[in-house]
């Protein structure tokens, strides 16, 4: 089972990646995680990435595709993977496709979790975090606005910068600008599956698994 997972900020992509990874017993490959691990491990690619970050530069496509290649070549990925957060650009998509050919990786499924933009904005701007324990809640679900339901801290709720409307809308614009060319590139080259991300979490999971089955993918759920 080989899956590339796409989803805009706030659509629940990370949550679904973790659930599907556990359900199908395949590794969840987050580019952020492998980049941080490569830096910790001081691998040649990790050192190159670290130098770029120290200079305040974006990590190059060349370094990122190298990290992805190292990861996909591991034995743990022999039965499949969920690739989350890559490719983000058309250049990365083309290089990833070439990498799949080099590694003889076929039958890749593109899972696209989507949602109405205004609903995403509403959902994210309603989030509040606790200054004490760090947990995040839907503001409308908090029964006592004076106390955190997890740790009991008083007057601890605040809105994170990432959850403010102008920041969210900018992130959505960037996602749309970068991702549309990637999806256009993969169209008709890979099996695409579109999922409504606004359904309850368990329903989204079920819909993803059902669609994978319809795509004649052998799964043990």
Image (cartoon, grey):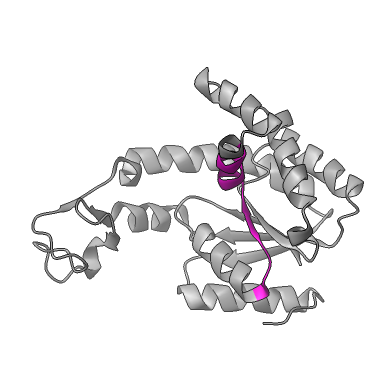
Where does the image place residue 22, in percent across and percent down from the top left? 60, 71
Q: Which of the 4 image quadrants contains residue 177?
A: top right
Quadrant occupied by the C terminus: bottom right
Where does the image place residue 28, in percent across and percent down from the top left? 62, 59
Identify which residue, 3 or 50, lies in the foreground.
50
Q: Outermost residue toward the top? A: 55
Q: Outermost residue toward the front? A: 41
Q: Which of the 4 image quadrants contains residue 139?
A: bottom left
Q: Which of the 4 image quadrants contains residue 78?
A: bottom right
Majority secondary structure of the magenta segment? helix
With respect to residue 35, does 6 lie above or below?
below
With respect to residue 207, does 60 lie above or below?
above
Is 90 covered by the magenta stretch?
no
Residue at 58% x, 35% y is 39
Q: Is residue 56 visible?
A: no
From which residue to which does the magenta span run? Answer: 24-38
């Amino acid at each position: 089972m080989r899956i590339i997972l796409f989803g805009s900020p706030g659509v629940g992509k990370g949550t679904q990646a973790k659930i599907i990874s556990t359900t199908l017993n395949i590794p969840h490959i987050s580019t952020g995680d492998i980049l941080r691990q490569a830096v910790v491990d001081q691998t040649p690619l990790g050192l190159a990435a670290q130098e770029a970050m120290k200079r305040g530069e974006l990590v190059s496509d060349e370094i990122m595709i190298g990290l992805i290649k190292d990861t996909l070549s591991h034995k743990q990925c022999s039965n499949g993977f969920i690739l989350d957060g890559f490719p983000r650009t058309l250049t990365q998509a083309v290089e990833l496709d070439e990498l799949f050919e080099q590694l003889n990786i076929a039958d890749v499924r593109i899972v696209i979790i989507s949602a109405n933009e205004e609903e995403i904005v509403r959902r994210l701007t309603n989030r509040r975090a606790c200054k004490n324990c760090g947990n995040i809640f839907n503001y409308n679900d908090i029964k006592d606005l004076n106390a955190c339901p997890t740790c009991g801290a008083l007057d601890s709720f605040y809105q994170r910068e990432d959850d403010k409307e102008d920041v969210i809308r900018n992130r959505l614009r960037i996602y749309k600008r970068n991702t549309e060319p990637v999806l256009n590139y993969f169209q008709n080259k890979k099996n695409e599956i579109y999922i409504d991300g606004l359904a309850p979490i368990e329903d989204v999971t079920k819909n993803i698994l059902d669609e994978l089955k319809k795509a004649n993918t052998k799964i043990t759920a």
